[in-house]
Image: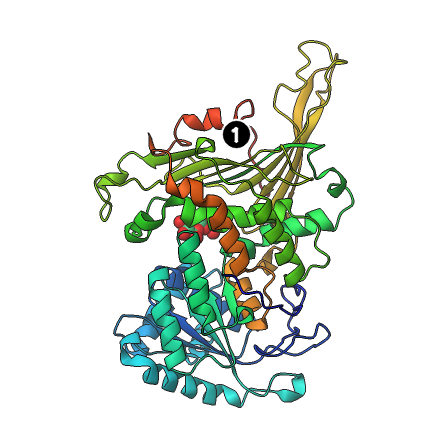
Amino acid sequence: MATNEVEQPEQPIAQSGAQTIAYPAPGARPNRRDEAALAPHVIVLFGATGDLAKRKLLPGMAYLVLSSLAPKIRVVGTSLEDLSPDEFRELTREAVDAFGTHKLTDAQWDDFASRITYVPQGAGPEALAEAVAAAEAELSSEVDVAAGMTAEVQRLHYLSVPPKAARAVITMLRDAKLVDRSRVVMEKPFGTDLASAIELNDFVHETFRERQIFRIDHFLGKEAAQNILAFRFANGLFEPIWNRNFIDHIQIDIPETLGLDQRANFYESTGAYKDMVVTHLFQVMAFVVMEPPTALEPRAISEEKNKVFRSMLPIQCSDVVRGQYAGYRNEEGVARDSDTETFIALKVGIDNWRWAGVPIYLRTGKKLAEGMRIISIAFKEAPRTMFPAGSGVGSQGPDHLTFDLADASKVSLSFYGKRPGPGMKLDKMSMQFSTQETENVGDVLEAYERLILDAMRGDHTLFTTAEGIESLWDRSMQLLDDPPPVKQYQPGTWGPNAIHQLVAPNAWRLPFERAWREKK
Ligand code: BG6
């Protein structure tokens, strides 16, 4: 079961771009007033030759060094592939060039290359321990106790491996005696149902304490997701109307145009619900609907998120549309009779004082018409009696507040206004904000950069707890035990037709009636 251990409060969210940051050592009781520089870290990257490592993690680590956000790191890559350190550096260079958001000069690359090495997982725990010890020895001269760092180099184990492989990695870390001074980042899915999640959490807790574990959900690392917290809690304008009296319904809509992208094996055993909903969509939903936390710090935020998950009504099969794109069963690696959903739309209810009766619609899927990530809040409509027939009031749906979770976040508020000219004709108008239009756009951190940095700092604010994950699986059991049959949809559409009945009498916000305003 989830640990009952009482965690100490950690650091509040620090500013991105800040170079002096508070940092507690893994075993230490963090003190919010500590102003220590980030200690040197050895990052042990499991799954170092995999897709996520190439696309996000290695380029992200290169940027953390380059930007001086985490200048003193060394990376020990490891995976099932039998590569030499030089071959791994070559792979890393290609990955950084192809996927990095910031290009490296030759000198910058040479610096980063000198910080990475590789040891095949097959070489065993001793070889891994030796590689880590060598990296620690190289870093030890960089420990600066005067700057408030802990006296020893710290360790961050990043498990970019499928859940089945996570156990072997944890065992290897224990055998290699790499548990001290360490934190461990785990990739989703965290189990595949309630029983497996409890079992996995119990297993990990045999080796690591909950405060050492960082279950990553990269959506919460997106600037735009954190902007929801800023928007809700830093402004007096919206919070008073953030409840069932003023809000009619909410949509969290994350359609993707991508297909399987060589991940048939992974996807066949997960599907859209486990891949996207249990992790990303529910986590983002919690930021949208949670009560104001007592402070913007990890324990307070986790408490509020966990309360949301506990208040969620069990998902009813009749509130779910599962879809599969035509042609999925012919994809390489997919069973010819596969029942895996590549699309899901569902209605969720939160049974608490703030949200009772307000439906929350979630949708995500592969090979859909557009790639978008939006949260849309629909407000209750005004009485229309005073407007003449044909004025257009209400004709374009309710007023909406919309968040776009793109890397550079956008927010828009739509409302009815008068069309210029004679008479009283109304049009839907919008006020839009985009980070792209601000001078800070260059400071946006990619989600994984932000989260790797937070894990090294020991800041759990944007990570998921064992308890939260277990509640979500608990609310999902009816659906997992008796899923409705998958309905086929054509690639390039918005999913099976049944999605319209699901939200009736409301309508899906996407596709947008007006495009986002682009920077001139
Ligand atoms: C991943 C899922 O976690 O998130 C993928 O496994 C999905 O299936 C991806 O495509 C979407 O993330 P982003 O940040 O690219 O929108």
Kindly identify the residue that appears in the image at 65 percent across and 20 percent down: 394
Amino acid at pointer 1: Trp
Exactly how many numbered labels are in the figure? 1
| Image spot of residue 448 (x, y percent) | 50, 61
Image quarter for residue 421?
top right
Residue 163, compared with residue 64, is above or below; it is above
| Image spot of residue 450 (x, y percent) | 55, 63
Query: Who is closer to the viewer here, 220 or 318?
Result: 318
**Residue extending farthest top:** 389
Q: Is residue 191 left or right of residue 351?
A: left
Image quarter for residue 21?
bottom right
Disc 1: which residue: 508
Residue 8, compared with residue 421, is above or below; it is below
Residue 285, compared with residue 369, is above or below; it is below
Kindly identify the residue that appears in the image at 47 percent across and 67 percent down: 185
Would residue 47 be seen by someone viewing this image from the given angle? no
Query: Who is closer to the viewer here, 452 or 180?
Result: 180
Helix, strand or loop at mark 1: loop
Category of crowding for the residue at label 1, using alpha-carbon neighbours closer than 10 angstroms: few (below 14), some (14–19), many (at least 20): some
Query: Who is closer to the viewer here, 202 or 59?
Result: 202
Kindly identify the residue that appears in the image at 56 percent across and 77 percent down: 26
Quadrant of the frame with the C terminus? top right
| Image spot of residue 92 (x, y percent) | 37, 69
Q: Is residue 409 left or right of residue 275?
A: right
